[in-house]
Image (tube, coloured by chain):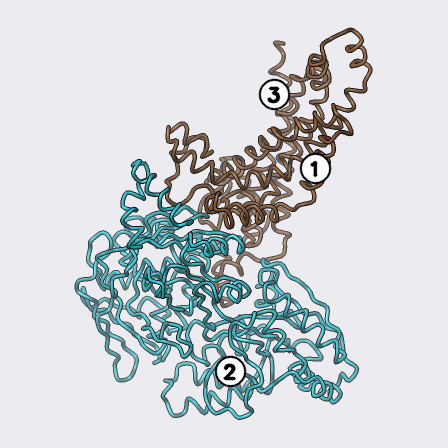
Chain colours: A brown, B cyan
Amino acid sequence: MAGRGHPVLWRLAQTIPVIAGVVVISFILTRALPGDPAVQFAGLAATPESIAQVREALGLDKPLIQQFLIYCGALLQGDLGRSVVTGQPVVTDLAMRLPASLELTLTALLLACLVAIPLGLLAAVHQGSWIDQLCRVVVTAGVSLPTFFTGILLIYVFYYLLGWAPSPLGRLDFIYFDPPRVTGFHLIDTLIDGDTETFFGALRQIALPAITLALFTLAPIARMTRAAMLGALSSDYIRTARAAGLSPSKVLFGYAFRNALLPVVTTLGMVFSFVLGANVLVEKVFAWPGIGSYAVEALVQSDYAAVQGFVLAMALLFVLLNLLIDLSYALIDPRIGFSAK
Amino acid sequence: MSSLDRRAFLASAASAGILPFLRILPAEAQARDTLVTVFGQTINSLDLHRVGTNRASYQVAINCYDRLVGFGAKQLPTGEMSYDYDTIVPELAESWTISDDGLTITFKLKPDATFWDGTKVTAEDVKWSFDRAVLAGGFPTTQMRAGGFFRPDQFEAIDEETFVVRLDYPSKLSLPNLAVPVPFIINSKVAKANATGDDPWAMEYLHMNPAGSGAYKVARWDQGQQLVYERNDAWVGGELPAIRRVIVREVPSAATRRALVERGDVQISMDIPDRDAAELADRLTVHSTPIENCMHCLCLNSKFGPFQDANVRKAVAYAVPYEAIFESAAYGRGAKLWGGPEEIDDIAWPRPFPYDTNLDTARDYLAQSGYPDGFEVTLSISLDLVDWMEPTALLIQEALGRIGITVTVDRIPGANWRTVALVDKSLDLHLENFGGWLNTPCYYFFWAYQKDRLFNSSAYESEAVHELTERTLHMAMDDPEYAPLIKEMFAHVIEDLPRIPLYQPALNVAMNGAGGYEFWFHRQLDVRPLNGGEA
């Protein structure tokens, strides 16, 4: 096991060309997009003269290759540039908004797993029973209801009609102060601060958006759990285990579930990636100050540095995520080792 | 029920002593000196002069900074309150005199005016702030020029309380242009202390840290989430506001904003869609004010062959289904701009053009044109403005189809819209929504009808209109020559039809537990006149 650090480093080294590619492509793509930032940022009333002034101020009058070199130079020093829209360094913007999105996404995924995995498991064990039908209904409904619709529906019922949920005003109601920042996750930071009042305030705010996202994400997880469990339960080694007289719970959890977990983890990784990108609609409905709405705003306004920074941050995140998933494979299934690669 | 729950919850939270915002809330909840407002945009800077500052951020310049002068208030015929373009009132200036030749304006500053840090507002601060506005480049510089302010040497601080503006030519737009959001007065001592060699105007600092003398200070700003205004009790710019604290929350989804204001958890929802305004009007207080000097137009580009034919333009003007557009795109909010009288007997603008939907007349005009069998054309709309542009475009597409003009609707992404529509002026047929800040017809003509101007997206070129606009732009409105010249301008564009007015849009604001709303040309919420009343 002494060599385990080395393959991980090797995996990390492999991602360098990927990141370099992302840097180049995101730079070229933002420039290729329609829209002229100088016109966009020249304000309400503009003249050809004022547009030229803005173009110069943004450094967009320089040749493309020079702009790219300036960008790369800054990047090497960890500077992602400055967003014109927010007037702040992109790094600061991302550090503010990424935790909000991650907190929402992770809470939703946790919630989805808590429901979807037992549901899929039971559906597979009792195939064709009412619980299997329930699983089918939940999966179909979850996939077919768009998130913004579920979000508005939940607001209508639980906030507008019943008054159980707090005002859908983002991460915290305006009566609270943000907790001292440690992780950027309000749910964790409030606990570190020992401020349970604000913790429950944050919990109340995150409930509806997290449920909205969870309803959407539990479908693929439940489906995959069910399918993987069915596959595992009908395999030879389970028949052997049962014939050997192992207890049903040992067979189910020790052998079938553990083997079924691999595709489930893969699905989780995929779901996480697309939810982090796709929850912009949920963010809009719940006024959640997340990374999705930031990216869309930046795109609409041709804010080059912000778009590039977002793409790069996402690429890094996914590289990290894939690494974590690969590592977890090795934990779940000892036959998959890094040394094999 | 909900407000009771909320109050109980707030009270318990406040008594726990952990919510610094709330220490005074139980008393407040009765007197209501805190208002919560929501809107769909985002405030991206606290400094209007910065490059990239968006329209929603102008409210900070309005509420937190003072200008030398402001506009008064008036009641519209509909009963709504509005700012009054024709009345200039003191803000930081106590009085002013205009020289006989109209070239020198001398302002006396209020002797007791102070910035938030307690230092006196001096003419030197005004000079620094105006220099900044004319030299910053981009939008503030362009807007300053509209009033005849081009260079720092036009501004002089005579002594601590006397400030002089020298104009190259007398203009009726000069004084009103000092009351728009742009020429706001900054605490130059604070700004200079935070300026650097690369950043002589302290753009970096003022972006995050306003330094003004206005009615409200920024208590906190969480970018992308909320801005909290807190009253400046030492304000001398006008009557002290009734509301101590105003919380502005950003909620992108219109459906969510509607639920919040309907439930009464927020008191003001700014700039709500026409549809919500129509539906909420009988349940809440909804203010719908036609936006001054603004029109939603169908623009016919002069570079496009068929539109060079006057008969084609008339045919289009008679084919447009005005009533249906007004009902389905604007939900009847705003003002009609069609079916007006032939005779031009006043200088009101926007005004109804003398065209109405009549497909027979439209067909006659098309038959007389060089394109009796019709033609094909692309109608372009902006994806950022689909709310009204999409239904309007579909109705126009259908109507023009009936007289033989085949229309394809093209939706252009918001980022690209300004470039292709306004700068390149390359869209043959498109919708446009320009509104002028300074409320005179000649100012609208300057931006939308004069050759090569940004909002002249029809690429309209008329020597006569260009000349008339030049002559009237700075002329006093009570000059006996003014009205006849303006009427002549109207006659030209009504005949030439580069822009076919559809309707005058409304700015809609829903209120639930607040009063005192005033409409402003800049379409932002001026929180200063608000109160917690029901009116």
Judging from the image, what secondary structure is the residue with disc 1 in? helix
Judging from the image, what secondary structure is the residue with disc 2 in? loop
Check if mark 3 and mark 1 are on a common chain: yes
- Most distant residue in the right direction: A236
Judging from the image, what secondary structure is the residue with disc 3 in? helix
Q: Position of residue B532 (x, y in %)?
A: 33, 59
Q: Position of residue A243 (x, y in %)?
A: 80, 9
Residue shown at the point (47%, 60%) measured from the top left: A53
Left or right placement of residue B507 versus residue B201 in this view: right
- Measure the C-alpha gap from mark 2 to mark 1: 57 Å
Q: Count neighbours of disc 1 (C-alpha within 10 A) and say few if under 14, some if 14 to 19, many if 20 or more.
A: many
Query: Please, is residue A178 above or below residue B233 in the view?
Result: above
Q: Chain of mark 3?
A: A
Please tell me whether mark 2 or mark 1 is closer to you in this view. Answer: 1
- Measure the C-alpha gap from mark 2 to mark 3: 72 Å
Q: Nearer the viewer, residue B444 or B451?
A: B444
Kindly identify which residue carries mark 3. Answer: A9
